């Protein structure tokens, strides 16, 4: 067993951090959050420096690297600005990984090379008003027509739809005995007639945020199908495992940023003639935060390694998502307490971590659902 990164991976992380320090400093992240502005310059800088090609196979011009390098990219992007990492992960998962796994030759040639150059952004339309945790109960329908398919229905919480070129849209194409059957995935051009996007006001994730999307007689060509007709649910499952790695890496990075800020504050804020970090009530919080974060990081890279070996299980993915999300939430909460009244003020960054981290235990499968999956794996 070897817990160390290779020197190449260390160098990769170092180069990435040099770039992110320059294009995504803390004040940039704060401004994007306050002004509800997507971190476009930082996103484009990552594309310009080739980071979108990290996981794309070499035959399509990418670097063809493993989930471990992907986790490094998302951890560091998340440490600089969680929403930058979220934008990056959506494009890499739904425009990169999904197309690599299930795209036709033509889709791969068209899409992967444009993702690589930062020309395309992707989002994911799974959740509907009546199917959240019970995601396979979705009812958005795609009906075959002479020109391709016609889509009708409603999605909610499609994050980044308003800034994406394509949505990986999960639809029902036939009524079958089980809800997991008869599902088909499409790569839908977000600017097609019949699509209406409405922004949803949320507690956090304000720079990009999320949307409600209405599909009314949206016509897509048959070439927009991704993967096998009626067999889309298995594919969604695979994307969600990948998503769990990406989310967990990004949020471990964000939690690390919250921890670093709280630690520095505890060393420099004086009360009763000494730094507050000298009070056991504060130092033990920081010790707990450090221990939880160390476990998060180990789980992220263990899962990345398991994925690279083709050995990851559903339960591994759920343990990862559960622990890293709950850690981010707990670390931001303790961080806010360490800052006292200043933690509650909008001029300090801790409130952003606190707001953003609240989504971690909900989005991408709630903590309750992750516990259900783990329990099922235990035969319960
Ligand atoms: C800001 C934001 C961004 C998002 N981005 C996206 C996105 O880009 N794409 C997308 O498709 N979706 C997205 N989502 C949707 C997200 O994945 C869902 O909100 C989540 O899966 C929960 O679904 P729900 O909100 O309908 O809650 P519900 O499923 O209604 O759950 C409500 C409560 O009941 C609990 N519950 C439900 N079923 C069970 C059960 N069987 N056992 C125990 N407890 C249960 C839940 O854990 C939760 O506490 C986003 C959500 C938010 C808020």
Image: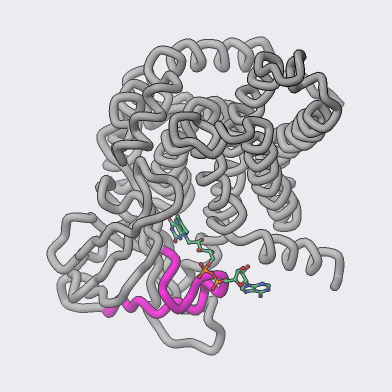
Could you say which quadrant of the image residue 223 lies in? bottom left
Vertical arrangement, residue 299 with respect to residue 325, above or below: above
Q: Is residue 281 visible?
A: yes
- Decide whether residue 140 is among the magenta residues: yes
Give the image location of residue 271, x and y in percent: 71, 20
Which residue in the rendered view is the most extreme toward the left? 193
Give the image location of residue 84, x and y in percent: 42, 34
Give the image location of residue 105, x and y in percent: 35, 46
Which residue in the rendered view is the most extreme toward the front? 272
Residue at image location 58% in from the left, 35% down from the top: 341
Vertical arrangement, residue 341 with respect to residue 19, above or below: below
Q: How is the image coloured?
A: one colour
Residue at image location 73% in from the left, 33% down from the top: 293
Give the image location of residue 219, x and y in percent: 18, 69
- Looking at the figure, which quarter contains the C terminus? bottom right
Vertical arrangement, residue 171 with respect to residue 225, above or below: below
- Of residue 310 and residue 317, the one placed in the foreground of this image is 317
- Looking at the figure, which quarter contains the N terminus? top right
- Of residue 32 and residue 166, the one placed in the foreground of this image is 32
Magenta span dominant secondary structure = loop
Give the residues drawn in magenta, as a range: 126-143
Residue at image location 29% in from the left, 31% down from the top: 40
């Amino acid at each position: 067993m070897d817990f160390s990164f290779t020197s190449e991976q260390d160098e990769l992380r170092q180069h990435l951090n040099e770039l992110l320090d320059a294009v995504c400093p803390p004040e940039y992240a704060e401004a994007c959050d306050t002004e509800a502005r997507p971190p476009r310059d930082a996103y484009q800088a990552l594309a310009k420096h080739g980071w979108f090609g990290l996981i794309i196979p070499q035959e399509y011009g990418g670097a063809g690297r493993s989930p471990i390098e992907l986790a490094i990219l998302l951890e560091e992007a998340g440490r600089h600005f969680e929403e930058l990492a979220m934008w990056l992960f959506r494009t890499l998962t739904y425009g990169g990984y999904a197309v690599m796994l299930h795209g036709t030759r033509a889709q791969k040639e068209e899409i992967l090379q444009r993702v690589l150059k930062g020309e395309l952004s992707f989002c994911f339309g799974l959740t509907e008003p009546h199917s959240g945790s019970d995601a396979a109960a979705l009812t958005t329908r795609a009906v075959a027509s002479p020109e391709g398919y016609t889509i009708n229905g409603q999605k909610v919480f499609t994050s980044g739809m308003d800034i994406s070129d394509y949505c990986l849209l999960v639809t029902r194409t036939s009524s079958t005995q089980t809800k997991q059957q008869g599902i088909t995935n499409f790569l839908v051009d977000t600017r097609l007639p019949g699509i209406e996007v409405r922004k949803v006001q949320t507690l956090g994730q304000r720079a990009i945020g999320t949307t409600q999307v209405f599909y009314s007689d949206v016509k897509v060509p048959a070439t927009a199908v991704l993967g096998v007709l009626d067999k889309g649910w298995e594919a969604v499952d695979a994307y969600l495992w990948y998503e769990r790695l990406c989310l967990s890496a990004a949020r471990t990075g964000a939690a690390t940023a919250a921890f670093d800020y709280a630690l520095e504050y505890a060393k420099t804020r004086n009360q009763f003639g000494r730094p507050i970090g000298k009070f056991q009530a504060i130092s033990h919080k920081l010790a707990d935060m450090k221990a939880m974060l160390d476990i998060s990081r180990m789980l992220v890279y263990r899962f990345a390694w398991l994925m690279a070996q083709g050995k990851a299980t559903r339960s591994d993915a759920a343990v990862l998502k559960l622990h890293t999300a709950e850690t981010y939430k707990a670390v931001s909460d303790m961080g806010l307490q360490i800052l006292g009244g200043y933690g509650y003020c909008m001029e300090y960054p801790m409130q952003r971590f606190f707001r953003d981290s609240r989504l971690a235990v909900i989005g991408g499968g709630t903590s309750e659902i992750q516990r259900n999956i783990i329990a099922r794996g235990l035969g319960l």
